[in-house]
Image (cartoon, helix red, strand yellow):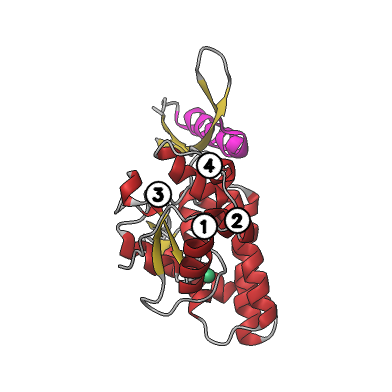
Amino acid sequence: MKTTFRALPVKTGVDGRVAFDIQDNLPMVREFYRGIREREAKSGKTYEVEVTVDVHYRQRSLKQLNLLWALVEIMALEEQGSYDEDTKYGYYEGLLDLYAPRIDARLTDRNVPKRASDMTTVELSKVIEGAFQQLAWWNGISFESAAQLRNYWIEWHQWRGKAKRDPLDGTYESLEDYRQRIAMCEACTRRLESGAGHMAHIVSRGAGGGDTDPSNFLLLCPECHLYTQHQHGWQRLLRDYPHLKHKVDRARESQSARPVSETRGPTGEAPEDTEVGMF
Ligand SMILES: [Zn+2]
């Protein structure tokens, strides 16, 4: 008899060992063994049990799910003018169809999108990113929704910035893939028509910055790139859009450069990146 239980690693701090928490599945585990004991008692046979533990390395935070539903609400409100539950659920399903990994449903063997509540942090992050992408593509979004979207975008970047590693790092196939998936200026959240955005180097080529890894780039609208960042420098861009600080500092750190906040110079200092990276 085979079964799989989901577990989360829990730090123990004892001899570097890792303990696993199956607390959420405890009733299921009990039920499973109770069933086996019953069968054994009935049949007089002994059943061999094979248990697999499916480890989820990072606990999906509740905040991520909340954010996904907040974005779904904007979609429902913009298109239908209401927060009607069916409408919201329709958008939620649509997003899963587009961005969630697919799994085989247990009972029917049909290939279906994985539910958000079963996803890992990385998987759920990709769905949230997809929701932002969809909203960036929508025409004529109301001022109120655009303002809300900007707030969620900031919150989303702050959350990713606080994580040890950005959950989306390493999920981009190329710079073009990155550009397609973002679809809006990462600083001011202005929607970018296809190809209108600038891929701005964080650490320039001359200073050893990579040319292919999206973690060394920000997708910016021409104004944020050419006016704010080029003419007034990173300090000004990060003052106006502090949600980008984590990504910028991480990229600089990887090249042993000091965080922007520690660089000196008057406002309007010569920008370190003078290349206009257009791809
Ligand atoms: Zn911008």
Q: Which residue is mark 3?
A: 203
Q: Are marks 4 and 2 in contact (CB under 8 Å)?
A: no
Q: Are marks 2 and 1 in contact (CB under 8 Å)?
A: yes
* Residue 115 x %, y %: 51, 58
Q: Is residue 86 visible?
A: no
- The residue under label 1 is which amino acid type? Gly
223 or 96: which is nearer to us? 223
Tally the marks: 4
Q: Quadrant of the C terminus?
A: bottom left
Q: Is residue 115 magenta?
A: no
The amino acid sitting under disc 2 is: Thr
3D distance between C-alphas at marks 4 and 1: 13 Å
Q: CA distance from mark 3 to mark 1?
A: 12 Å
Please give the residue where the numbered disc 4 appears in the rendered image.
Answer: 259
Front of the two marks 4 and 1:
1
Q: Residues within 10 Å of mark 3 (few under 14, many from 20)?
A: many
What residue occupies the far top of the structure in this picture?
A: 15
Please name the residue shown 52% across and 51% down the image. 118
User: Label for residue 243?
Assistant: none
Check the image and report above or below for 182 versus 261: below
Residue type highlighted by circle 4: Pro
Q: Position of residue 71 (x, y in %)?
A: 61, 69
Q: Is residue 36 magenta?
A: yes
Q: Disc 3 residue type?
A: Val
- Density class for disc 1 (Cα within 10 Å; few <14, some 14-19, many ≥20) is many
Mark 2 CB in 8 Å range of ligand 1? no
Residue at 47% from the left image edge and 71% from the top image edge = 221
Q: Which residue is mark 2?
A: 267
Q: Which residues are magenta?
A: 21-43
Q: To which residue does mark 1 refer?
A: 233
Mark 4 or 2: in front is: 2
Asked whether, in this view, residue 105 is left or right of residue 21, the answer is left
